[in-house]
Amino acid sequence: MNEALSRLPLLLVVVAYALFWGWEALAPRRMMPTQPGRRRGNLLISILSFVLGGITGTALLALATWTSERQWGLLAPLHAPAWLY
């Protein structure tokens, strides 16, 4: 149950993105000259951006956890209280 709830925001974003992309494909606000690859190119750029953002966020979270476990950082040499960092 918890795993399903933790994946819900990702699923919601993907479903909403697909819904809006399909809506625009079926009923565009303004007609564009025929450029067959433009929609696919825009979709690929969006997917690439989404994936790179996820990878970057995951890598930063993993790096923060790794440095915290080894007590590295700017405040570690100061022997500051634990609540400070």
Image (spheres, rainbow, N blue to C red):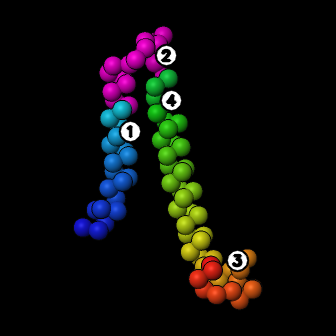
Q: Secondary structure at mark 2?
A: loop
Q: Which residue is denoted by mark 2 in the rendering?
A: 35
Q: Residue at x 55, y 67 (%)?
A: 61
Q: Residue at x 56, y 75 (%)?
A: 65
Give the main secondary structure of the magenta stretch. loop
Q: Position of residue 75 (x, y in %)?
A: 71, 80
Q: Which residue is denoted by mark 4 in the rendering?
A: 41
Closest to the observer: 28 or 35?
Answer: 28
Closer to the chain start, of discs 2 and 1, is 1
Quick check: 70 left or right of 77?
A: left
Vertical side of 85 occupied by 56: above or below: above
Closer to the chain start, of discs 4 and 3, is 4
Q: Which mark is residue 17?
A: 1
Q: Residue at x 75, y 86 (%)?
A: 78
Q: Quadrant of the N terminus?
A: bottom left
Q: Which residue is denoted by mark 3 in the rendering?
A: 73
Quick check: 77 left or right of 56?
A: right
Q: Secondary structure at mark 4?
A: helix
Closest to the observer: 57 or 36?
Answer: 57
Give the amino acid at mark 2: Gln
Q: Are marks 3 and 1 in contact (CB under 8 Å)?
A: no
Q: Position of residue 27 (x, y in %)?
A: 33, 19
Disc number lying in front (4 or 1): 1
Label 4 to label 1: alpha-carbon separation: 15 Å
Disc number lying in front (2 or 1): 1
Vertical side of 35 occupied by 46: above or below: below
Highlighted magenta segment, given as a residue range? 21-37
Label 3 Cα crowd, 10 Å radius (few <14 / some 14-19 / many 20+): few
